[in-house]
Image (spheres, grey):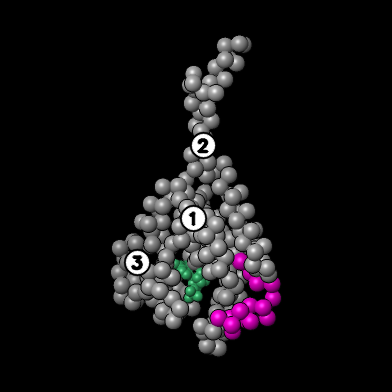
Amino acid sequence: MQELIDFFETFKFNITIKGHIFVISGFSGVGKGTVIKELLKRNPNMYFSVSYTTRHRRHNEEDGVDYHFVDKETFKKMILNDEFLEWAIVNGNFYGTPKSITISKIEKNIDVILDIDVKGAIQVKSKLPNLTTLIYIIPPTGKELLNRLYKRNTENIHEIATRITTSLIEINYINAYDYIVVNDELERCIDDVEQILKVQKMSSKVQFLSITASKEAE
Ligand code: 5GP
């Protein structure tokens, strides 16, 4: 008995954690971008995956920072070369998440944030179920969302109507998501998302436990 106790005293429990993919989706104009920026500020070890898109660049966007802006031809070549972890057509434009950089980050224990739509989210979850958490952000009311869209002034009324239609279709798939967060108050919304990230990182599905025995262990 004493032998077992002495042996147990030398045990060390080591946890290895792989990087995790946090997908943040939500209504266009719901404030995903602001939530993600704040998360990255609070967690400097996180990586934001910059998607490829064929959409035109808005005046406040930078190539390589907000998106990699490419033409349809280039995008289609990338699909054929299997360069995307997922891709989808959203509001008539192609969008895709680059595969190799995302995989290399999670292998290096770096968490990756993806701002992608429902179709993309479902693809990522089905490819990497244990390493992916899906979070959907909704606005408190339609009026609040419209106010934000008018204020940001980056889409005309037709584009706004298209985006609302897309969001209303998307919301039918909300059950595919692990968490739903309401963005009624920005700080609280960010705190909620941050708590989700912390809890998910403690899941037994992403932590790998190994036990070593060593005389030097205290
Ligand atoms: P926006 O044109 O407003 O930047 O984005 C439109 C929609 O495309 C948003 O719902 C955004 O989350 C989604 N999106 C952006 N990048 C990707 C991507 O790489 N893959 C997919 N599936 N959707 C994306």
Q: Which mark is residue 44?
A: 1
Q: Which mark is residue 15?
A: 2
Q: Assess mark 3: CB under 8 A from ligand 1?
A: no
Q: Which mark is residue 14?
A: none
- Front residue of 190/20: it is 190
Q: CA distance from mark 3 to mark 2?
A: 37 Å
Query: Is the magenta region chiefly helix, strand or loop?
Result: helix
Q: Quadrant of the C terminus?
A: top right
Asked which secondary structure carries label 3, the reply is helix
- Contact flag, marks 1 and 3 (Cβ < 8 Å): no
Q: Residues within 10 Å of mark 3 (few under 14, many from 20)?
A: some
At 41% from the left and 80% from the top, the residue drawn is 56
On screen, residue 179 versus residue 125, left or right, reads right
On screen, residue 102 versus residue 22, left or right, reads left
Which badge, 1 or 3, comes first in the chain's sequence?
1
At 51% from the left and 59% from the top, the residue drawn is 40
How many marks the image carries: the answer is 3
Identity of the amino acid at label 1?
Pro
Compared with 165, 2 (above or below) is above
Q: CA distance from mark 1 to mark 2?
A: 21 Å
On screen, residue 177 versus residue 87, left or right, reads right
On screen, residue 111 versus residue 171, left or right, reads left
Identity of the amino acid at label 3?
Ile
Give coordinates of residue 112: x percent, y percent: 47, 56
Which badge, 3 or 2, comes first in the chain's sequence?
2
